[in-house]
Amino acid sequence: MLQANHAVQALKYSEAVVFGGEPICLQSLFKKQPVEQLDAGRSLFFEGDPAKHLFEVVEGVLRIFKIMADGRRVITGFLYAGDLVGVSLRNHYLYSAEAVTPVKLRRFARKSFEDAVSDSPELRPQLFARLCDEMAAAQDQMVLLSCKNAEERLCSFLLQQLRRKREQERATDLIDLPMTRLDIADYLGLTIETISRTMTKLTNKGVVSPAGRHSIRIAKPGTLAHLAGDGDECHDSSSSVVAFDCAGRRH
Amino acid sequence: MLQANHAVQALKYSEAVVFGGEPICLQSLFKKQPVEQLDAGRSLFFEGDPAKHLFEVVEGVLRIFKIMADGRRVITGFLYAGDLVGVSLRNHYLYSAEAVTPVKLRRFARKSFEDAVSDSPELRPQLFARLCDEMAAAQDQMVLLSCKNAEERLCSFLLQQLRRKREQERATDLIDLPMTRLDIADYLGLTIETISRTMTKLTNKGVVSPAGRHSIRIAKPGTLAHLAGDGDECHDSSSSVVAFDCAGRRH
DNA sequence: CGTATACTTGATCGTTATCAAGGCCTGTGG
DNA sequence: CCACAGGCCTTGATAACGATCAAGTATACG
C-alpha cells in the first residue's frame, strides 16, 4: 500500500524550487522536516489515537495492524521508504503502526498537510493516485485472504517483495524479509508453522533457497508467479462471463 | 464501501442553488443526469475495462467483484442507494459490477467528474472522506477474512445489514437480503453450504428467525453483535500493547 | 559461552470445503 | 388454479487443509 515513487524524488524537488517554493511532489513537502528515529519494535501510534500527524518513511520498514478483541493481530500492510503513513483516515488512526526495523521518518502535521495538498493542483491528483493504489492493494489482499491457499499466499507475498526489490534494483533474485515469520503469518492470515512448512516445501521444489533468516533467493521467479495463482493478470473483459459460468469452488 | 449520505441530499441540493449553481454535495452533481435502468443479473462494467464513467446508485443493489484465474469469484462489496461506483481507480476499473436486483443509476463522465470535484473546495473533502470510508471498510473486511470463523463472519455481515437498515428506518429487526447465498458466500470467503449451516445454527440459537428466502428477522441484536466478535470496538490505545502480549492464535 | 528468541518439524484435531442427494420456493404454462 | 421445471437452498457424509499442541534446533545477542 502507498507504493513509493522515490526514484523521481530528487528531480521533483529541484522543480519545486523553480515554482517559487510550491512543492510539486508529495515527498518534497516533507523535505524540510527533521528526520526522526524509531527503534525496531517501537510503536509510532496506536489504532484509535487522534490522528495529529502524517509520516513519510525515509528508511526502514513499518508494519501497520489491527488487534482484535481476543488479541489476534491482523497486519494490513508493510510500509517502506517513500511510503506515507496515516493518510487514509479522518480524525483517528485506522490502525496501529510499529517499526519492524529501525526506521527513519519525517513528521508532518495533519492540518498543514491537508492544507498544502488542498491548495495545490499538482499534489491533489498525486494523493488521490496513492489512495487508489492503496485501495487496489487492499482489494488484492482481500482476494488473497478469500481464495488462496497457504502456498499461493506465500508465493504472492514473495512475488510482491521481489517486484518491490526490482523496482529499485535491476535483476535481483535475492530478497530480504526484515519481518519475522509471525509478521508474515499475521499478514497472510496463516500461522508461523504453516509459513515455515510452506517455505520448506518451496525450498524442496527448488523455487526458492534460504539465504539466512531474513533473506531468501528466488531460484525460479516464473514458477513462483505461477504458484501465486494470479493467472498472469489476464483481464479479458469478455471472458469474465465465461469464467463465471465454469466457476470453480475452492477456498 | 462508499456509504450513503442520502439523508441530507435534498437539503444540500437546495443549498447548491444558493451558491450560483456550484454543487455542494457529491450526489447533487448527478442530479441532472438521466436515470438508467439495469436488470437484475446484468453487468454494469467489467474489471479491466477503460474507466470512462462513474455511477451513482439511485435504487437497488450492485455487487462488485473480481474473478480469479481459476474462476473463483471474490465479492469485494455490495453497493446501495447513494453509493458511488467506480471512484477508486485510475484508467481501468479495479473490479466488475453487476446488478443484484433491478438497479436505477445515474452516469457521469469520469473526466467531468474529476474536473468538477477538482474545482470545488466543498466537494474535494467529501470525495476524500468517501475514499477513507471505503478504505476503512476494506480493512474491516481484511480482518474478517483473516481471523473470523464462519459464525463470526455471517454475524458481522448480518450486523452490517442491520446497521444500514437502521440508518434509514427506526427500530427495525427485519432485514432483507436481496443477494443469493452464493453472493454472501463469495463476499465472506465461505461456501453456500457453510452459509446455510451457519444460518440454521443461528436460527436454532434463537438469534435470528428466517422470514422468507430474502428476508430475515434479527431476534437478538445484542447476541448477534457479540457473536460478530468485534469486541464492542474497544479502542483503548494503551491496552493494545497488553493485547499483543497475551495474543491468542486462532485463524 | 549461555540464554532467550525465532524458527523448524512432527503428530493430532477441528473447521470448513467438497461431494451428494433431497426439499422448497418461484415463476411459467397448461 | 394447479402442475411442472428449474434454480436455490438445506442437510448429510466424508475429506483436506491448516490450526493447535508439543518438542527439538538454530540463530542472535548479552
Image: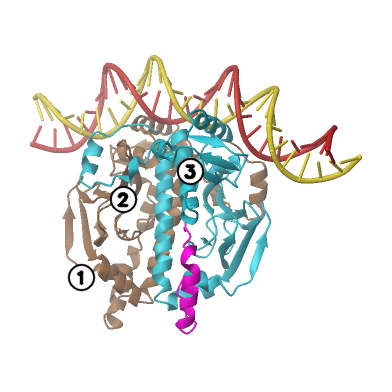
Chain colours: A brown, B cyan, C yellow, D red
Q: Is residue A122 above or below residue B182?
A: below
| Residue A77 in picture, x, y percent from top left | 35, 49
Residue B157, numbered circle? 3
| Residue B43 in picture, x, y percent from top left | 64, 56
- Pick the quarter of the image with the N terminus of chain A: bottom left
Q: Is residue A132 above or below residue B138?
A: below
Read off the chain for label 2.
A
Which residue is labeled 2 in the image? A95
Read off the chain for label 3.
B
Is residue B220 visible in the rendered structure shown here? yes
> Looking at numbered disc 1 in the image, what kind of residue is underneath it?
Lys
| Residue A18 in picture, x, y percent from top left | 29, 82
Separation of disc 3 and disc 1 at Cα? 46 Å
Residue at the (49%, 62%) spot, across then down = B89
Left/right placement of residue A126 relative to residue A45 reads right
> Looking at numbered disc 2 in the image, what kind of residue is underneath it?
Tyr
Query: Of C1 and D24, which appears nearest the observer?
Result: D24
**Residue B15 part of the magenta segment:** yes
Q: Which is nearer the N-term, disc 2 or disc 1?
A: 1
Left/right placement of residue A216 relative to residue B85 reads left
Q: Are marks 3 and 1 in contact (CB under 8 Å)?
A: no
> Looking at numbered disc 3 in the image, what kind of residue is underneath it?
Phe
- Whether callout 3 and callout 1 share a subunit is answered no
Residue A32, numbered circle? 1
Would you call the spot at circle 3 few (<14 residues within 10 Å), some (14-19), or many (20 or more)?
Answer: some
**Residue B236 part of the magenta segment:** no
Mark 3 vs mark 2: in front:
3
The residue range painted magenta reads B1-25
Q: Are marks 2 and 1 in contact (CB under 8 Å)?
A: no
Is residue B70 visible in the rendered structure shown here? no
| Residue B138 in picture, x, y percent from top left | 43, 51
